[in-house]
Image (spheres, rainbow, N blue to C red):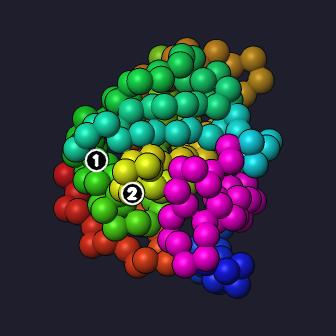
């Protein structure tokens, strides 16, 4: 897809700041006419100073998405390194089926997903989280990887939050974003 198409999409998404930078870098990996880049086209180091807040999640089967890689900023805020763990394991249980349905839809019908949620830690229960999730096609020709840029409200100076215990307990929203292939119909919320 040419640069002109990417500019139009970014404008319609109204992405700003780091989300716009993240989208633009991801879009630069696509070949002419592609909605989604192939994994072999992705150059993670191109994300530069965004890398500490980037997450890779890989599909291991139906309804089975696991952390593949987490940036150092995310590991620090989470208080752990959950590589290999189900990416929905921290999500409040009443939202898991809905989030999983969105991941399956985005893998079948390529689109981006914007996430907004509350974040609860062991000692603090009032942080917020936003993420832009973009698809990547694997060697099998299917979308099997999602790359996320995470904006999480950072702890205040000197604040000890403890480990992450839950996402979405108080608030949880997913919005599909057209990356050129349209968007699927939304699954029924739980």
Q: Residue at x 55, y 78 (%)?
A: 33
Residue 50 horizontal/vertical position (percent): 73, 44
Q: Quadrant of the N terminus?
A: bottom right
Q: Residue at x 75, y 17 (%)?
A: 158
- Disc 2 to disc 1, C-alpha distance: 21 Å
- Residue 103 shows in the view: yes
- Residue 131 shows in the view: no
Q: Residues within 10 Å of mark 1 (few under 14, many from 20)?
A: some
Horizontal arrangement in the rendering, residue 9 relative to residue 60 (left or right)? right
Is 186 in the magenta? no
Residue 133 horizontal/vertical position (percent): 50, 53
Kindly identify which residue carries mark 1. Answer: 100
Q: Which element is circle 1 on?
A: helix
Contact (Cβ within 8 Å) of mark 2 with mark 1: no
**In front of the other: 125 or 93:** 93
**In front of the other: 128 or 46:** 46
Kindly identify which residue carries mark 2. Answer: 141
Report the disc number at residue 12: none
Snapshot quadrant of residue 55: top right
Magenta residues (range): 16-44
Residue 183 horizontal/vertical position (percent): 37, 74
Vertical comparison of 39 with 124: above or below: below
Count the numbered circles shown: 2
Q: Which element is circle 2 on?
A: loop
Q: Residues within 10 Å of mark 2 (few under 14, many from 20)?
A: few
Is 18 in the magenta? yes
**In front of the other: 48 or 39:** 39
> Which one is earlier in the sequence, the residue at label 2 or at label 1?
1
Q: Residue at x 19, y 52 (%)?
A: 190
Residue 121 horizontal/vertical position (percent): 49, 23
């Amino acid at each position: 897809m040419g640069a002109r198409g990417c500019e139009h999409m970014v404008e319609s998404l109204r992405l700003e700041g780091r989300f716009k930078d993240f989208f633009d870098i991801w879009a630069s990996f696509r070949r002419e006419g592609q909605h989604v880049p192939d994994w072999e086209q992705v150059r993670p180091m191109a994300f530069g100073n965004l890398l500490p807040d980037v997450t890779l999640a890989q599909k291991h089967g139906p309804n089975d998405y696991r952390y593949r890689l987490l940036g150092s900023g995310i590991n620090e805020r989470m208080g752990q390194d959950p590589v290999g763990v189900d990416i929905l394991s921290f999500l409040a249980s009443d939202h898991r089926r809905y989030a999983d349905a969105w991941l399956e839809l985005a893998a079948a019908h390529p689109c981006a997903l914007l996430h907004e949620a509350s974040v609860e830690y062991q000692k603090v229960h009032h942080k917020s989280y936003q993420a832009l999730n973009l698809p990547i096609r694997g060697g099998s020709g299917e979308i099997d990887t999602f790359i996320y840029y995470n904006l999480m409200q950072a702890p205040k100076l000197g604040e000890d939050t403890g480990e992450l215990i839950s996402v979405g307990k108080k608030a949880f929203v997913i919005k599909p974003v057209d990356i050129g292939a349209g968007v699927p119909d939304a699954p029924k919320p739980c």
